[in-house]
Image: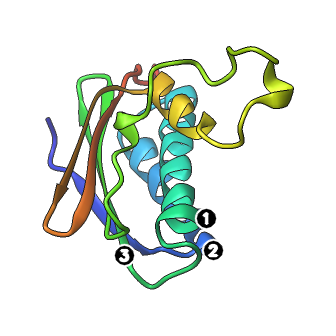
């Protein structure tokens, strides 16, 4: 595994563009292909948006820390925030789209966690040092040169 690249972003929705630029630069420098980059970006955007909207209940100056590294063809990431403790891995395993009544009567929310879960493997959560910490591995392949 390569030494992680780390950035901290204020928990403000306006910082999504900087988060995306960080991921794009990281992937470009390491020859990570577009499809894999988009998966990593989607995972981080979902986590970031949930932290701001639900964890902090709106824009805040509290930092969100993101560390990225590569391990073979995979991108590993550590995502940390100081919002109240919340383990996104503790949600139930039932697909939120599959229940009586179909999608029209499905409760709002929960799909982002499912989406992230479908894009990663080896997910682990901990609450340490007053921070939510989420370790994830996004499987993928490097772009051919």
Q: Can I make out residue 109 in this image?
A: yes
Residue 131 sits in which quadrant? bottom left
Contact flag, marks 1 and 2 (Cβ < 8 Å): yes
Horizontal relation, residue 32 to residue 76: left or right: right
Query: What residue sits right under mark 1 in the picture?
Result: 17
Point out the tag, 3 or 1, that comes first from the N-terminus.
1
How was the colour assigned to the protein in this rendering?
A: rainbow
Rendered location of residue 96, percent (x, y): 63, 24
| Eye-nearest disc, 1 or 2 | 2
Residue 72: x %, y % from top left: 24, 23
- Residue 143 location, x and y as percent? 46, 24
Circle 2 crowding by C-alpha within 10 Å: few under 14, some 14–19, many from 20: few
Q: Above or below — where is 124 with respect to 55?
A: above
Q: What's the residue at 49%, 34% (across, down)?
A: 116
Task: Give the label, 3 or 1, closer to the camera.
Answer: 3
Q: Which residue is mark 2?
A: 14
Mark 2 → mark 3, Cα distance in angstroms? 13 Å
Q: Residue 137 or 25: which is nearer the viewer?
A: 137
In this rendering, position of residue 97 left or right of residue 38: right
Instruction: Report which residue position mark 3 lands on.
Output: 63
Determine crowd level at label 3: few under 14, some 14-19, many 20+ residues with C-alpha closer than 10 A.
some
* Precedes in sequence: disc 2 or disc 3: 2
Of residues 46 and 143, the one nearer the viewer is 46
Q: Is residue 108 left or right of residue 61?
A: right
Residue 76: give its label: none
For label 1, the crowd category at 10 Å Cα-Cα, with few meaning under 14, some 14 to 19 and many 20 or more, is few
Against 46, residue 119 (above or below) is above
- Report whether residue 21 is seen: no
Question: What distance separates the C-alpha of mark 3 from that of mark 1?
Answer: 15 Å
For image coordinates 57% across by 79% down, the residue present is 59
Q: What kind of element bears circle 2? A: helix
Quarter of the figure with residue 61:
bottom left
């Amino acid at each position: 595994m390569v030494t992680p690249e780390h950035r901290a972003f204020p928990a403000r929705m306006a910082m999504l563009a900087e988060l995306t630029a960080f991921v794009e630069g990281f992937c470009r420098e390491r020859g990570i292909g577009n499809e894999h980059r988009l998966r990593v970006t989607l995972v981080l955007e979902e986590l970031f948006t949930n932290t701001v909207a639900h964890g902090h209940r709106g824009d805040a100056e509290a930092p969100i820390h993101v560390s990225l590294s590569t391990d073979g063809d995979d991108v590993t990431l550590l995502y940390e925030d100081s919002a109240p403790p919340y383990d996104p891995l503790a949600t139930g395993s039932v697909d939120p789209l599959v229940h009586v009544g179909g999608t029209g009567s499905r409760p709002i929310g929960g799909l982002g966690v499912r989406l992230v879960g479908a894009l990663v493997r080896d997910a682990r959560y901990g609450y340490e040092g007053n921070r939510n910490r989420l370790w994830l591995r996004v499987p993928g392949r490097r772009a051919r040169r």
